[in-house]
Image (cartoon, rainbow, N blue to C red):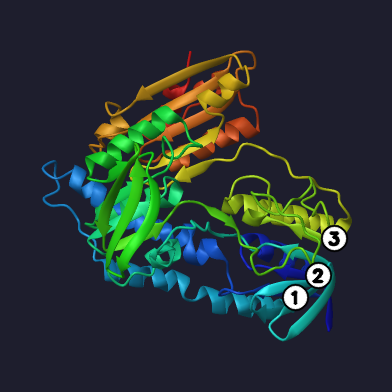
Amino acid sequence: MQSFDLIVIGTGSAGKTVAEAAREAGKSVAIIDKLPFGGTCSQRGCDPKKILVGAAEIVARSSQLVGKGITSSATINWADLINYKKTFTEPIPENTEKKFADQGIHLFHGAATFLSETTIRVGNDDLQANQIVIATGLRPKPLDIPGEELLTDSTGFMELAELPEEIVMIGGGYIAFEFAHIAARAGAKVVILHQGKRPLEEFDADVVALLVKAMRAIGIFIVLEAKVTAIKGESGALTVQYERDGSNHQVSARLVVHAAGRVADVAELDLAKGNVELTKKGIAVDEYLQSVSNPAVYACGDVADKGLPLTPLASYEGKIVASNILNGNNRTYVNDAVPSTVFTVPPLASIGLTEEQATKQGRKIKVLFQETTDWYVSQRINEPFSGFKTLVDEETDQVIGAHLLGSGNEEVINLFALAMKHQITATALGQMLFAYPTHASDMKSMLPD
């Protein structure tokens, strides 16, 4: 049995933050991961995905300007793009391990399993610590349908040596929409099958509807209220069966991607032995991000049942946990509005309440919803779909929600976040002088009178 002050399970943004802070404070730290060290975002998620999106953006921009100064649309060489992506991702595990080792953090590879409330087994090693941090992130949600083993997940998609001509995305969230855009711009025929009545259900319905129009305009076929019942065939020649409107349907594809949600990655942990409570959303934690059932355990990042599964939140939660471990529970989780972006082409960015949520809360709000394809920022690049919706509280003059579609809005949303965090009124925001012509300079036109 090896003893440490702290054991951290997971090497992504959350786990890394806690481990390094504890080690810097002089604690003995062990860190464990069953996957290559470095976490999902940097290797299998946000960062490599954005590289692929960058290529899709070039295709979109050039095709929009054909005949307007550009002679032909760019095309994607998939193999070259994936090789370029690998130049970012492949060094990460070795670099991460080296940094941990240089800091004096002890590394363990393999799946962690609780033996008791304060002991962990990984491979042939048994580890004990006064405190344990779970930061294992999420994994694809089991669909429990025949042929599920034939599905590819988001990790597999970003490792494809060649892009198949026909792809089905199961799901209607971030992953399905972002990968559909990448694949379509790379020349694939893409079908999205979503079980719900509308996709991206956490985002504003009107702005999402504009995005759906943009997707259909480039040939992405979206089927709503479609319940997938089975996957049949063999790799490269698959059939997806689904139910819709009481009838059975099917669609053929070379590749089927699981994009229908994710759940806490805790299957191997044997949480019962660790006396760690799990909810449908993740590990149950209190405002200190401490397990509600085992005070020796904290959880942070996507695996905890707080907040949205976003990398900035994972780092934020890691800092909270580190502070509470080192100083006693002195820092609580604050559920501030956090900006998020769906990196489609054009991107969809959002922060705060939707109109539906604000109405349910009984807020008195001023709402402005507008399509903006006739605005200069869209006309300049011949962008065919763009728009926004903003919500301002009538009593406080505070922006309480912003939902933006269009090129550049993945950055503009951060200005709205800044205004909301520091309580800059809509009136004051509208009086700001920004560099012109820029996307930011349109903010004053996005605010209701």
Q: Nearer the viewer, mark 1 or mark 3?
A: 1
Res 326 label: 3
Q: Residues within 10 Å of mark 1 (few under 14, many from 20)?
A: many
- Residue drawn at the location 58% of the way across and 23% of the way down: 358
- Residue drawn at the location 42% of the way across and 45% of the way down: 172
396 on left or right of 18: left
* Count of labels in the image: 3
Quick one: label 3 or label 2, which is nearer the N terminus?
A: 2
Q: Residues within 10 Å of mark 2 (few under 14, many from 20)?
A: many
Res 6 label: 2
295 on left or right of 219: right
- Residue drawn at the location 36% of the way across and 37% of the way down: 406
Q: Mark 2 is on which residue type? A: Leu
Tell me residue 140's x, y (percent). 51, 59
Q: Mark 1 is on which residue type? A: Ala
Tell me residue 65's x, y (percent). 18, 43
Q: Are marks 2 and 1 in contact (CB under 8 Å)?
A: yes
Quick one: label 2 or label 1, which is nearer the N terminus?
A: 2
Q: Residues within 10 Å of mark 3 (few under 14, many from 20)?
A: some
Q: Nearer the viewer, mark 3 or mark 2?
A: 2
Tell me residue 423's x, y (percent). 65, 27
Tell me, yes or no, if residue 435 can be seen here: no
Residue at the spot of label 1: 30
